[in-house]
Every structure is written in structure tokens, then in C-alpha cells.
Amino acid sequence: MINQRSEKLVNSQLENAPGEGYIFNWFDWFCLWYPPGWLILFNRHWQHYHPDPDGWNWLEYGLFLIPGGFYLALLSRWLRLGFRSPRKEVGEFDPKYQQAFGKEILAPIVKYYFRGELQQVENLPPTGPLIVAMNHAGMCFPWDFLTLAYLLSEAKEWVVQPIANPVLFEHPWMIWWLPPQWSQVLGGVRAELDDFESAIAQGKILLYAPEGIRGPGKGWRRRYQLEKFNVSFIQLSDRYHIPILPVFCIGSESLHPWAINFTRLQRLVKLPFLPLSLLMFALLLFPSMGVWAMKTRLRYFIQPLEPVELDNHSKKGRAVAYEQAQQLREKLQLQINQFLGKF
């Protein structure tokens, strides 16, 4: 669990007046518009609410900003920690910290950089639980997911938890880039059947990518072509009487444009996908840009709710669930094609 001292600090900070929370200063605005600085924003915000002696320090933040400096910062931190990795703490979801991160960090990024907006909001139900099923793309940090989760929380005051690839929890790159258990504390649910089913059983609002990792892994050449949908979300929706809210996103394909998936190297470094594009040369010089993405406009089109079939509770076989999943994929693909055909 998050240690008691950290939890008390977060709660006391969030219960105080807004002016006592994390407030953007000139350096934060600089980091927002300078791509290698995004990682600094995430870590500085975490350190504002959590004691993190193993985290990055100001000298290392400064090194992030110069070509090749991240490697010196990494060496500095490793030496400072006594030739070991940052300590791993067991983190639990903290909705108060999720709210603070949304209002204080995501808000300016979503508003000024990704220009996120919800369309057809009349299709939003009044409350959850829900499975929000969305096309997932970009071949980068999951900004299409984070942006939608933030917009839904702002529009309906929902607490939304994304289903995230296990790599976002445990890959060595993530352990060094971001604070310990950052994904869990912000509400990420591991994309594994047991964790997914447990979250569904608790009646949460979950953000799910039916394409799985095939979505962002398809690359620029197949942009806006939906891959085969998984069936687990259909079966769990049926079993627990949780309706599905389909959403399609326009703009996510441009988060990392012109990229292809370098499969052999991806397997070597144990990543779900590894995009190859001209932007990767910048990433070699500035590895902190791993959480950055190209500026785009993210528009989310809310589709009518897919109701639960109450007369078929817990009896839907895999073949029937597969057919229903692909029907939903075809329906979303048609909507995407119609929208793109207008331009």
C-alpha cells in the first residue's frame, strides 16, 4: 500500500484551498512546450504530493533538457541510489491524486496541446458502471486514453480507470522514467483477465481498447482501420450486466505519424510495439520524450449505449461473443469511414 505518510500528505494537499495545490509556474509552462520536459512535469507533480527520495532531482531535470543529457542524468541517479534501481512500492488507486493530476497537469495538456473535445455528449448515460470501448492508436504513450478519461471526468465527474498494458506497470524503462507505481495510483488496471474481471465486478467505469495492442501496433499505413476486437469485454459485460459505451476517436493516429512497427527490435526490448520513424532520432537524443506525442486535435464521438441483454445473463458463449464484438467493430468502422469521408 501507499505508505501512510504519503497518503496523509495527498489528502491534506487536496483538501486545502486550490492555491495550495500544484500550480504551474514559468518552468512548468516551458516544460509543456519543450518536448523533453513532459517527463519533468509528471515527476515534479508526483513529488509535490509524495515523498520520493529515490526520484529525480533538480540537477537531473536540467540534464533532461540538453541533447544526450538524459543518459548523464540516469547515471547520476544510479550512482546516487548506490548502484540500484528505484525502490518499488505497492501502490493502490488513489482517486484524490487522480483528480489532482487531472486538474493540475492533464488539464493544460488536453486544453492547449491536444485540444481534446467530446462530441455527441447526449449519448452519455447519467452514471456508471460502464465499459467505455474505444479505438486505440498513436504508437506512443496512451494519450488518447488519458485524454478521454480526463474529459469524461470533467463532463460527468466520473472516476474513470483505464485498462493498461502490463508494460506500463513493470517495464524497466517505466520504472526509471516515472515514479514507483505511478500507473496504479492513477487508476490503471492491468490488461489481464483476472484484474479486468475484478474491476468489472466492482462496478467501475473502465476505459477499454477492444483491439488490444493490435490497435497502436498497426502503424501509420493502416491508420483508422480497426483491428479484430477481443471478446473478453463482451463476455464480462454480459456476465455482470455492465453496458458498453462505444466511442471512436479522430486524431489519435497523428500522435506519432508516419511510423511503422519495428517488430524484431520490439521483441528484443520486450515492448508491446516499437515505432520506427524520423521522430525516433530525437528520442535517441532526448529519451525523456518517451512520454511525449505530436500535437494534434483529439475528438471523441460518443455512440449510443450498447444495452445489456438481461435475458442472456452469463450464458453467452465465446462464438456468440466473438460475433457481437466484430459487429460492434464493423459499426464503429462504418462511423469512422463516414466521418473521414466528409473531409
Image (cartoon, rainbow, N blue to C red):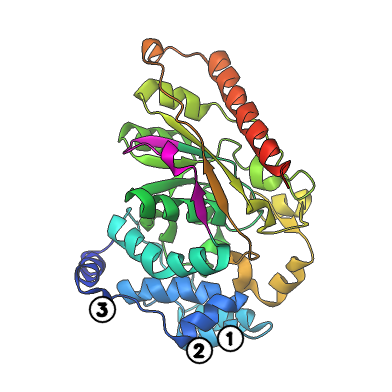
Indicate the amino acid at tag 1.
Leu
Q: Do the residues labelled 3 and 1 touch (CB within 8 Å)?
A: no
Q: What element carries label 3?
A: helix
Check the image and report above or below for 210 versus 11: above
Residue 59 - label: 2
Residue 50 visible in the snapshot: no
Left or right: residue 200 compared with residue 255: left
Give the residue drawn at x 73%, y 41%. 341
- Residue 330 drawn in magenta: no
Foreground mark, 2 or 3?
Answer: 3
Check the image and report above or below for 336 versus 8: above
Which quadrant of the view contains residue 87? Answer: bottom left
Give the residue drawn at x 45%, y 47%. 162
Residue of label 3: 20
Q: Nearer the viewer, residue 155 or 164?
A: 155
How far apart are the alpha carbons under marks 2 and 3?
25 Å
Q: Horizontal and vertical percent for residue 196?
A: 43, 36
Graded by Cα atoms within 10 Å as few (under 14), some (14 to 19) or many (20 or more), the crowding at tag 2 reads few
Graded by Cα atoms within 10 Å as few (under 14), some (14 to 19) or many (20 or more), the crowding at tag 1 reads some
